[in-house]
Amino acid sequence: MVQLGVNLTPIIVKRVVDLPALRGRALAVDAFNTLHQFLALIRTRDGTPLMDAEGRVTSHLVGLAFRTTRLIADYQMRLVFVFDGRPPPLKRAEVERRRQLRRRAEEEYAAALEAADYAAAFSKAVMTGRLTADLIDDAKRLLDLLGIPWVQAPGEGEAQAAYMARRGDVWAVNSRDYDSLLFGAPRLVRYVTIHGEEWLPSKGRARRLMPEVIDLETLLRHHGITREQLIDLAILVGTDFNLEVKGIGPKTALKLVKQHGGLEGLPPEVAARLPRNYDEIRRLYLEPEVTDDYRVEGGALREDELYAFLCDERSFSRRRVEVVVDRMRRAHRQRSLREWLTEAP
């Protein structure tokens, strides 16, 4: 899978938890990030994505249907999927970079298949997933049928998710990227996963993962910086809107920002290598395009339409879809009971 977002890992302050610690929490899910993960990892042994009888990719639907419903039914999580809108013009270079990386991975994947090296093929296949408009529409359709709410962001999905978290409509943003912190999310939760593994293409193996909770105020207080300084640090390291300043990693960037206050105070030899439009990049994080037109409440489970979509149109087995339906029935009963108890005198 192509690496996304800004690299803050070396300076991140996190709390590692287990899934039960997130029971009942409302999370704004970075939909594109999550769907890319499903496309990357839900594949056959040789790296081929799962498909229906007509050759349409279904890996993302499998992930949504089985992983998401289990989080909702078994852990009572209240998930709201947030979809990206139009990317800002400044992101065009990053989009093109990712496209080139995918093309190269596709070539290497084909070569590995030709050599019958299936381990190498799988490691390259995870970086080839393309989230097309049809796949996005299928995902939204499935969420509607399951009664799971989703939001269409006007711009960056993580900006919208962070806005919802700041307003208190959700407890945290759920994404593997750190960008929502730059957009002001009070909390970020990473690695909300059932099996707790992440595939590392460069090493050809998986690593065990546990959910991580990152509190923005705790992070800023620990380092003695402001959110504006965190954004400046990210610009030095490289974001979706600009390349990194060569030779400056997160720890060095933190030191520079603390020592000099921000980008304007940097030594001339560093300032000369900054993107000229760094103030515009700052504004993208501080004043992103968001909308108030959203809901976080779930809808009704539409069982007949769900069977028709997954079984008749996308070649899912009825027995497996029955598992999904049972989970969502259970989740709806739990939700009704919770609402009744809340309203009871």
Image (cartoon, helix red, strand yellow):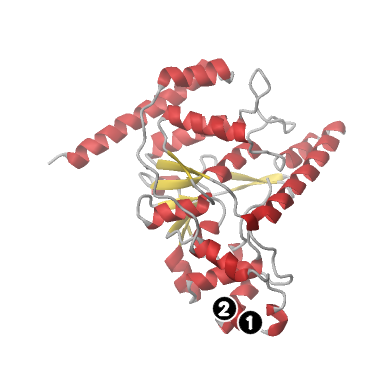
Tell me which amino acid carries mark 2: Gly
Height in image: 300 above or below 247? above
Q: Are marks 1 and 2 in contact (CB under 8 Å)?
A: yes
Q: Secondary structure at mark 1?
A: loop
**Front-lying residue, 219 or 303:** 303
Mark seen at residue 262: 2
Question: Mark 1 = which residue?
Answer: 266
Mark 1 neighbour density, 10 Å: few (under 14) some (14–19) many (20 or more): some
Q: Secondary structure at mark 2?
A: loop
Provide residue 279's location: percent of width, then percent of height: 58, 70
Residue ID at (74%, 70%): 246
Can residue 181 be seen from the camera position used here?
Answer: yes
Q: Is residue 256 left or right of residue 324?
A: right
Q: Is residue 174 left or right of residue 50?
A: left
Q: Outermost residue, left direction?
A: 345
Q: Is residue 227 left or right of residue 129?
A: left
Where, quadrant-wise, is the N terminus in this rendering? top right
Residue ID at (12%, 41%): 345
Can residue 250 be seen from the camera position used here?
Answer: no
